Image (cartoon, rainbow, N blue to C red):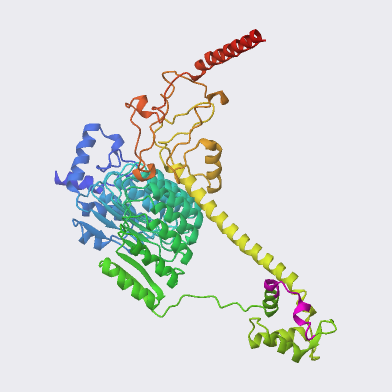
Amino acid sequence: MRADEDTSVHSLSLDSLSLTDCEDPHNVILEDEGDQEPDARESELKLIRKDLSTEELYLQACKLLRVVPVRFFLRNLGSASINLNHHGLGPLGAKALAIALVTDMHTTTLELADNFLLAEGARYLMEMLRANFTIHNLDLSDNNLQSAGAECVAKMLLENISIKSLKLSGNKFAEDDAKWFADALASNYRVKELDLSHNQFCGRGGEHLGQMIANNDGLEVLDLSWNHLRMKGAVAFCAGLKVNTTLKHLDLSFNGFGNEGALALGEALKFNNTLVHLDLNNNRISDEGASLLCKGLEANDTLRVLQMAYNSLTVEGALTLINVVKNTPKTAIEEINICNVLVNENFVQLLELICQEHPGLEVQYGGVGGFIAKKPRKRIDPMKVIQDYLDHRKLRLWDFFRNIDKDGTMRVPVVDFRKAVQQSSIPLEKFQIEELIQRLDRDRTGIVDYRGLADTRKQMMRDHRRQLRKVESRQKKEKQKSDRILKTFESAVEAVTPRSSMIISPGAAKEDSSGLQPFSATPLSSWHHIIMSNSSRYSVNNMSSEHVHLPMIGNASSSTGMRSYSQPNLFASIPKPSSSKPASAQGIHSRSNPSVSSSKLSPTANLTRSRPALNTEPNSKTKGKGKKKKTKKRNEKI
């Protein structure tokens, strides 16, 4: 019997160890299985699985695949954690490892970072994970998986129910690869930690990632650092963050959010009530962006740790951040990291006062020695000062200089001009008077030609109008940019928020019976146009208001489409209105209950369903009769 077992062991081949050709991955299939009867094959498979241990199976697989066995793996067989980082396994080494781990029941943590597995090695490991439900933590960072590897991992997540922590950092995933993870995690709620840092997700990647966190109800830790989300990706991602209900730790460092991304993030934090740790290090956020972010922090009562180091912050931005803690009684912030910012004494004093009320607050700053940048005082044109002086007193130039300019030629000696200006009440300093004399006597003739002052008014008005245009143009551009970002953010939120609200057109009321409204990964530029074209003036704005704008029922005659008076099923198709709590803050899985009666679902159930049109005719008849009686009486009197 032992000789037969040895023969069966040595008859194993590469095909017999393959996972793809195996009907049941828990069994190892023999090479000549086609020539055997089913009963004989099953008995022989059980014999092989019984006799081959995990170590022997791994060694046999390495021999057939012609790869060097990893002794560290053999020494740690049976332990809960196996660390094979930086061992140079390659795709074939991963295949041998996958064959050995198919039936392993001990390993819960498997680390395979930096092994050049490629998509091929990832495919072997993913096939193993379709059968192995013992491994909970998997690290595949820095393995150059690329798009094909992302597809393999995502398909595995659709079937595997044991993976809780997955690290895929530095695998050169393109931005469209984020869709694989969005689709996989829409139904997989077992994954609690996901690391997608150091990849190449950009604008469209931000859309897919926003879809991922909007539709997933299990993810708690997400690392997206060192990607390229920038402004467009940041706005789309923050729209998903607004409706997310499980995420607690979020790392968005090194993504170039800028002030625009900070604006969208602040809007999301107004509604998100689960996030505890937020990392925004190195995101090109300035003092303006910090103030926009703080508007969201003022309404947030769950965030505890805020990382804002290595942004373009000064003392002003630092003061803005700690003032949020001071002015917001319900804030939960315990740690603020601005370790590169130099603060001043006022900041330190204010922080000490805040810490008396919030003893658990910890703020890391760079040191004392910073200052609030102030623009230098603009030097006022002395010619403008004289013009303002004359305008205020309604004087002319000749009226001011007529005592020294008897001939009215508007040319006076420098000495007389200097003396006249000094003796007057014009608020000019000595250096301004000398500057004025140099400008009016360019050739150094000793005679001041103050006709140049006559042209100052026109130039002054032109400069003033030009300056106002510049300021207005700059403010208009900034407002348009902020409005554009907010509209895009609102449109993205509409895409990920369940349609608990309704859209009524003048023709008829429409119902979305599909429950969840799927996140549409459309280009950012088209989001706003889609929403505005569909909703018109009867849309529900989830961002600024939770009230439903209905057409005026009282003036029913003005709309032919809404001319329904007292039909019993008039409001039967209208969904349940949103509750007092914003729909986005309630999560994305608040489906409407079909068992609720139509009277409860109708936002206009309290309206009286009378027939106003039926009462108009009798009134008109009575009015007409009254007029006829009056005319008859008048005729009788005559």
Query: Which sits in the foreground, 494 or 426?
Result: 426
Looking at the rendered image, the quarter that the N terminus falls into is top left
Can residue 212 be seen by looking at this rendering? yes
Give the mark count. Answer: 0
* The furthest residue to the front: 637
Looking at the rendered image, the quarter that the C terminus falls into is top right
Q: Residue 499: x percent and y percent?
A: 42, 36
Query: Which sits in the foreground, 34 or 582?
Result: 582
Can residue 205 be seen by looking at this rendering? no
Say whether residue 403 is magenta: yes
> From the viewer's perspective, is residue 567 above or below residue 13?
above
* The furthest residue to the left: 1
> From the viewer's perspective, is residue 519 above or below residue 282?
above
- Res. 329 image quadrant: bottom left
Say whether residue 219 is magenta: no
Q: Residue 318: x percent and y percent?
A: 40, 69
Part of the protein shown in magenta = 390-404
- Res. 388 image quadrant: bottom right
Q: Residue at x 46, y 67 (%)?
A: 287
Q: Is residue 429 left or right of residue 38?
A: right
Q: Residue 36: x percent and y percent?
A: 26, 34
Q: Is residue 440 left or right of residue 275?
A: right
Q: Residue 117: x percent and y percent?
A: 38, 57
- Prevailing secondary structure of the magenta residues: helix
